[in-house]
């Protein structure tokens, strides 16, 4: 799990101060390959594309609120820990699991599951 302290400021307003925003939690499976970029859309329609710095120590991107207001969005890594079922219960987001296969030797073979969790402080999505 990666935990980021985040900040927002209105887009194209470089003289405005950064304002604290909800922490961002991110998890993507066994961390064998870490992403360079990530984007998501919340249940309320807010969305964010971000790019990670080397080593996932921070990110920069944009955030568009559900009303369409655009913000610059940045974050600094504050904590990192292994994923556990307890971690899933701490988050407002739903953990998504995908079964995967790898192609080698002329065939498809079972691989580790891909698990993805993004929690940007929004409400827990309904399960229905």
Image (cartoon, grey):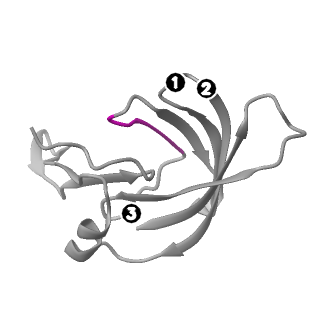
Residue 83: x and y in percent read 31, 72
Disc 1 crowd rating (10 Å Cα; few below 14, some 14-19, many 20+) is few
User: Image point 39% across, 63% down: which residue?
Assistant: 31
Residue 68: say if magenta.
Answer: no
Write down the residue under mark 1: 67
Circle nearer the N terminus (3, 2) = 3
Task: Give the magenta-colored segment's residue range.
Answer: 37-43
Residue 18: x and y in percent read 76, 50
Tag shown at residue 69: 2
Q: Which of pointers 3 and 1 indicates the residue nearer the eye? A: 1
Q: Quadrant of the N terminus?
A: bottom left
> Is residue 4 shown left or right of residue 86?
right
User: Image point 40% across, 47% down: which residue?
Assistant: 122
Q: Is residue 118 above or below residue 31?
A: above
Residue 3: x and y in percent read 50, 66
Q: Secondary structure at mark 2?
A: loop
Q: Secondary structure at mark 3?
A: loop
Q: Secondary structure at mark 1?
A: loop
Disc 2 crowd rating (10 Å Cα; few below 14, some 14-19, many 20+) is few
Identify the image quadrant of residue 55.
Answer: bottom right
Circles 3, 1 touching at the beta carbon (< 8 Å):
no
Q: Nearer the viewer, residue 44 or 57?
A: 44
Circles 1, 2 touching at the beta carbon (< 8 Å):
yes
Q: CA distance from mark 3 to mark 2?
A: 33 Å
Q: CA distance from mark 3 to mark 1?
A: 34 Å
Write down the residue under mark 3: 31
Circles 3, 2 touching at the beta carbon (< 8 Å):
no
Q: Nearer the viewer, residue 14 or 51?
A: 14
User: Image point 90% across, 39% down: which residue?
Assistant: 15
Dominant SS type (magenta): strand
Q: Hey, which residue is sitting farthest right in the picture? A: 15
Q: Is residue 125 above or below residue 21?
A: above
């Amino acid at each position: 799990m990666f935990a980021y302290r985040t900040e927002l400021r209105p887009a194209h307003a470089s003289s405005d101060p950064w304002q604290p925003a909800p922490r961002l939690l991110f998890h993507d499976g066994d961390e064998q390959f870490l992403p360079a970029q990530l984007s998501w859309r919340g249940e309320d329609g807010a969305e964010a594309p971000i790019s990670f710095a080397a080593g996932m120590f921070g990110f920069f991107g944009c955030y568009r609120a559900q009303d369409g207001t655009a913000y610059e969005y940045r974050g600094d890594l504050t904590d990192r820990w292994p994923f556990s079922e307890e971690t899933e219960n701490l988050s407002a987001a739903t953990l998504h699991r995908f079964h995967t296969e790898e192609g080698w030797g002329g065939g498809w073979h079972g691989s580790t599951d891909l698990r993805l969790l993004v929690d940007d402080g929004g409400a827990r999505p309904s399960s229905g």
